[in-house]
Image (cartoon, grey):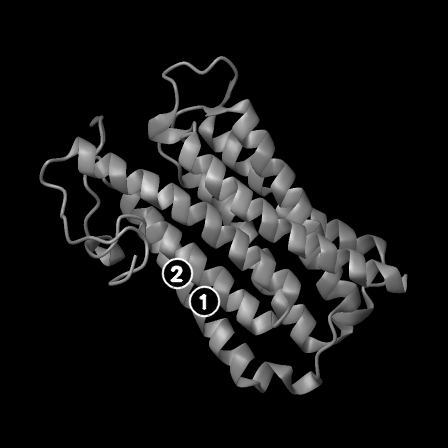
Amino acid sequence: MEPAEGSHLDALAYLECALGLLGSVLLKLVRSAYGRYASPRPACGVPARAAWALQELPSLAVPLWVCARTAAERLRHAPNRVLLAMFLVHYAQRSLIFPLLIRGGKPMPLYTCTLAFTFCVYNGYLQSRYLSQYAVYADDWVTDPRFLVGFCLWLVGMLINIHSDHILRNLRKPGETGYKIPRGGLFEYVTAANYFGEVVEWCGYALASWSIQGGAFAAFTFCILVSRAQQHHQWYLEKFEDYPKFRKIIIPFLL
């Protein structure tokens, strides 16, 4: 291991935070171009299932490649293995299972898919390289309150995310078209319950890892998903006159 690489990984983490802030600003200026906001016939679109699988897959494949090509010395320690497993479990579900569950779905613009793919390569490398080579934890870190609370938040957030996606997939009965107001679960309190789950998940991961790299990923996720949630919230208010006005955007009782 090169000592300077640890500093480089810190720099990449700070850059990820800056990219999150920049992305948040850009999303306020330019709407996301997929799903309900996509053109009916995008000039260069990728089928929804293929797009989600391809763009998320690097976050699973890159860490496996990073660990396979090096000694991955820090993975001899349980905290590092558990933290990397938390990251991989999310993206195994996101890249291998979630796309198969999509019902229909509009094609995703190629550039949107490419941006997501690039970020997943970047972040997949950052998290896995740090955990496999540089993150130093005491062997009893898995009993530390920060790890335990963080792990619980990660697990709860992932379950919220999966359950909320299930609700969204089942809004329409077979043969129905158009959009409906989501009901049930945390959708009774916020517009973007699925995004809330993901924010909680990665904040838990950041707490459990207690690292700049984990914190940067949580910060990036928060910046991007809050902006998308605001866009969704405004869309629902404009489209449905009976949309519940008491619902928050993404964080129950707060935002």
Residue 14 drawn at (x, y percent) = 66, 55
Q: Classify mark 2: residues with Cα within 10 Å, few (<14), some (14-19) or many (20+).
A: some
Residue 63 vs residue 102, the one in the foreground = 63
Which residue is found at the position 67% from the left and 56% from the top? 13
Tell me the kind of residue under disc 1.
Leu
Quarter of the picture containing the C terminus is bottom left
Residue 47 vs residue 7, the one in the foreground = 7
- Residue 159 — which label? 2
> For the residue labelled by badge 1, is the local secondary structure a helix, a strand or a loop?
helix
Q: Classify mark 1: residues with Cα within 10 Å, few (<14), some (14-19) or many (20+).
A: many
Which residue is found at the position 64% from the left and 68% from the top? 211
Question: Does 181 sit left or right of 100 as displayed?
Answer: left
Q: Is residue 202 shown above or below 116?
A: below
Quarter of the picture containing the N terminus is bottom right
Looking at the image, which residue sits at the far left? 242
Residue tagged 1: 155
Give the total number of marks visible in the rendering.
2
Which residue is found at the position 67% from the left and 69% from the top? 81
Q: Is residue 139 shown above or below 22?
A: below
